[in-house]
């Protein structure tokens, strides 16, 4: 690879305050890759994997018992992308893991570098990218269109908003996110959401995703004041990094019951 390019546009965290968590990146890129890898740093807007992020090359023939995210829930998500892509991924001879942790980063250049680097891998034999934190498979086309082409951080594209019915009251919805650990910030959990507030709560999540991704810290006990929502929604810091619902800590909000 060539020397780092110093003219790449910074991806700033305009609301950054120190004291957040570490940013975790974890992607699996499947395909048959041209080697040695090359990286046009200016074209891909990337200086390569940022410090703390490593690339592991796994050949399936040497790892016959390794799953590489092609079964269980992520396997069904891959199948939903289409039988042709699923078959190609299952037959791909290599998987590149791009993973690492960065200590409370003050800018998003690490994400810029990683997005561009993975785009270069997709242009050099990559077929699809598994994003376990977002529970998503990206095709080369969707990665390019949604993450690379915007040439900016687009936090909402890196995080997913999930919904499920509350067990104790199926008339209410649990709205929650996955993916905020990429930014070293907690995910969101909003419990007992009535249907009439669903769209507003979704927009609340999107606002939190954006503000936190750009560095905001949410204090414990913060009350939500947003047009269209009733009073009484309070933010509480909960959970731990091993919580399987998030693989992250989270901000818990419980919708007030009348």
Image (cartoon, rainbow, N blue to C red):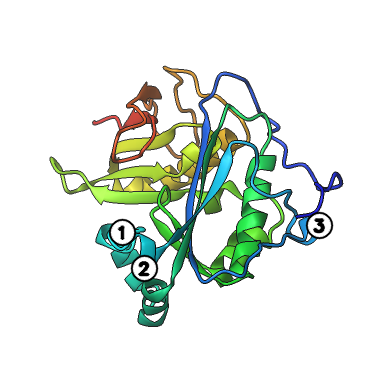
Tell me residue 236's x, y (percent): 37, 22
- Looking at the image, which residue sits at the far bottom? 84
Left or right of 44 in this view: 164:
left
Write down the residue under mark 3. 42
Residue 12's mark? none
- Label 1: few (<14), some (14–19) or many (≥20) C-alpha neighbours in 10 Å: few
- N-terminal label among 3 and 2: 3
Of labels 1 and 3, earlier in sequence is: 3
- Asked if residue 112 shows in the view, the reply is yes
Which marked residue is nearer to the observer: mark 2 or mark 1?
Answer: 1
Q: Position of residue 4 (x, y in %)?
A: 80, 46
Q: Who's the residue at 68% across and 34% down the image?
A: 107
In front: label 1 or label 3: 1
The residue that disc 2 covers is 78
Residue at disc 3, secondary structure: helix
- Estimate the spatial distance between the alpha carbons at disc 1 and disc 3, rounded to whole Å: 35 Å
Residue 231: image quadrant is top left
The percent coordinates of residue 34 (x first, y second) are: 61, 70
């Amino acid at each position: 690879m060539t020397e780092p390019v110093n003219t790449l546009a910074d991806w700033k965290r305009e609301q950054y305050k120190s004291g957040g968590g570490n940013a975790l990146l974890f992607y699996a890129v499947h395909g048959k890759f041209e080697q040695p890898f090359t990286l046009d740093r200016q074209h891909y807007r990337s200086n390569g994997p940022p410090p703390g992020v490593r690339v592991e090359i796994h050949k399936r023939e040497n790892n016959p018992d390794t799953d590489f995210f092609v079964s269980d829930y992520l396997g069904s998500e891959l199948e939903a992308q289409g039988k042709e892509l699923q078959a190609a991924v299952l037959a791909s001879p290599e998987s590149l893991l791009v993973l690492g942790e960065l200590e409370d980063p003050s800018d998003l250049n690490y994400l810029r570098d990683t997005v561009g680097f993975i785009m270069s891998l997709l242009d050099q034999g990559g077929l699809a990218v598994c994003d376990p934190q977002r529970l998503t498979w990206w095709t080369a086309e969707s990665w390019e269109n949604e993450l690379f082409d915007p040439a900016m951080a687009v936090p909402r594209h890196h995080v997913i908003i999930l919904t499920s019915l509350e067990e104790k009251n199926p008339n209410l919805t649990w709205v929650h996110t996955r993916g905020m650990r990429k930014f070293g910030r907690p995910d969101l959990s909003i419990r007992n959401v009535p249907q009439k507030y669903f769209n507003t709560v979704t927009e609340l999540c999107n606002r939190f995703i954006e503000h936190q991704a750009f560095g905001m810290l949410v204090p414990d006990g913060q009350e939500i004041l947003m047009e269209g929502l009733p009073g009484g929604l309070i933010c509480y810091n909960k959970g731990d990094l091993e919580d399987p619902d998030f693989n992250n800590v989270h901000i818990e909000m419980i919708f007030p019951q009348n």
